[in-house]
Amino acid sequence: MKLKSASKFEKTAARCWNLLNEGKPFTPIFVIGTMMIFHFQELLHGEWFPFLISLLFTLPLFILYFYYDFPLFLRNYLWIPVIGYLLLFESPNLALWGFGIGLYFFFTVFFWGTFYYHLRIGTDWLNFTRFWKLVLKNSDSTSGNAQEQLPKFLLLLAVWDGMMTNLSTGELLPTTHYFIFCGAVFALAFILHHFLFDWKPKQYDSFTSGVPSAEALNDKVVVIVIDGMRKERFYEANTPYLDGLMEKGTEYLNMETVYPARTVVCFSSMFTGTYPKEHGMKSNMVWKLGIKVESIFDSLRKVGKKGKMLGIAHLVDSFGQDVETVTAVMHKDKADRNIINKAKKIMEEQDPDLFIVQLIGTDQIGHSRGVLYDEYIEKIEEADRLVQEYVEWLEAEGKMENTTLMICADHGQADGIGGHGHLDEGERFVPFFMVGPGVKQGEKIQEKHSLVSMAPTIAHLLGAPFPGNSRGPVLNEALKESWMQHE
C-alpha cells in the first residue's frame, strides 16, 4: 500500500488554516470579514473612506487583542470593556452584533466542527450536535474559544461600526473619551497579565550543565509521542502494553509541558531543549519557518549520526527536512495505522539513530469529539495496540537490542474542543516514561520535570553534544549509575 505524505498543497493549506484556527490572527480576520459582508452595499457604492478611517481609529484595540492572550479565567474580564463601551458611547448596532454572533457560530460549529472535520477525518454530518457545547466550554488559544472571542469581536465591531456611522453622517465620536477608553482597556490588560497571569511553568534559567557521554550509550533512541494524550484519561484507559512498558522502565509522574501548549511549540521545545522565546515557535501559527536554535538533529549531525521525525505537516515549519510527513487528511480510524506503517518503512529504508514518531489519532478525536467521551479513551487504547505492534516489529528486526524507548505526550487536552495552549486542567502534566538497557526498572519519579529535558537526554544517550541552547537537565534519575551523565 502506498503511504501518502503531506503534499505541498497540504502544507500550505495547514499554514493558511492556522490563520483561522489560532485565536490571535482569527480575531482581526473575522472582524474585518464580518464588517465587509455587513456593509457590502455601502462598499459596493464606493463608501470606502468612512470604512477605512474608522478602521484606522480602531487599530489600537486590534493591536491590543492581538498582543495579549486572555488565558483561562482572565477571559472573564474581557466583558468589562464591552460594558464600559455601552455606558460611555452610543448603543451598538444590534443587527451587526447578531450577524457577528451568528457568523461566528456558523464558522466554529458548522464549517469547522462539522464540514471541515467530515472532510478531513471523517466525522459524521451530525457532529454539530456536540460541537457547539465544546465551543462554549473550550478554554484554549484557538478561534473556538467562544468565551474569549465573543467579547473581543463584539467590542471591535461596536467601536468600528459606531465610528463609521458617525463619519458617514459628518460627525465624530468624542475623540478624548475614546482615547481615554482605549487607555483604560490597555491598562486593564496590562494589570491582568502582570498580576494575575501567574501559572506558567517555571523555566530553567541556565543551560544544561555537565557534559554528555563521550561515546554513545545506545545504538538508537526511539521516541513515540501520542499527541494530545491527557494523563488521567490515559490512566483510565485499558492499555496493557504501555502499562507493561512503564513497569519495565522509569515513569515521570510530574512531567510538565511548556507554555503555550501548542503542538509546534511543544515539539520545538522537546527537541531543542529550550523555550519559545529562544527557538521562536510561539504558536501553531508560524510566521517565519525554521527554529532559531540548534535542534537534536543538528547535534547528531556533528557526530555523524542521523535523526528523523515522522509527523504531520505542521512540524515541517520547525524542523524542515528532518521531518518525514504523513498526510493528516485521512479518516480518523486510519490515521495512526498509516503512521505506524510508514514508521516501519522509514526504519527499514533509512535506519535512523534517532527516530521520533507522532501519533495523531488521540489529538484529532479530542479536538473533534471532546476528551471526556468514550471515543477519546478508544483512541488511547488503539494507540496502545499500535505501539505494541511497532515495538514488537522493531524487536523482530533486531532494532531494540541497545535502544532506549521514550513514550510521552506533547501536551494534554482540556475540556471543550480538546483545548490545549493556556495550560488548563488536563493539559499541563503529561504521561512520560522511558525503557531500555540503561534505564532503571520500576522507578516512579515524583520530582517535577519538563519536556525540555528530552533533547539533552537523547544527546547524552547517543553520544552527541547538547543542542546549543539546551536548558533542560539530563534525566539522570531514570538512568543506571554507569549510564548517568557526569556533572
Image: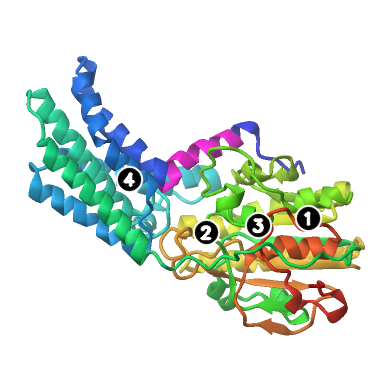
What is the secondary structure assignment of the residue under circle 2?
loop
Using the image, tell me which numbered label, if any, was put on residue 355: 1
What is the secondary structure assignment of the residue under circle 4?
helix
Which quadrant of the figure contains the N terminus?
A: top right
Tell me if residue 135 is in the magenta stretch: no
Task: List the residue tagged with mark 4.
Answer: 64
473 to the left or right of 28: right
Percent position of residue 200, x then y: 47, 65
Q: CA distance from mark 2 to mark 4?
A: 22 Å
286 to the left or right of 207: left
Q: Is residue 424 above or below residue 26?
A: below
Q: Which residues are magenta?
A: 10-23
Q: Residue at x 70, y 52 (%)?
A: 339
Task: List the residue tagged with mark 3.
Answer: 359
Question: Of tags 4 and 1, which is closer to the observer?
Answer: 4
Task: List the residue tagged with mark 2.
Answer: 261
Comes first in the chain, label 2 or label 1: 2
Total number of numbered labels? 4
Say few, some or many: other residues with alpha carbon within 10 Å of mark 1 (under 14 / 14 to 19 / 20 or more). Answer: many
Q: CA distance from mark 4 to mark 3?
A: 36 Å
What is the secondary structure assignment of the residue under circle 1?
strand
Q: Is residue 433 visible?
A: yes
Q: CA distance from mark 4 to mark 1?
A: 41 Å
Q: CA distance from mark 2 to mark 1?
A: 22 Å
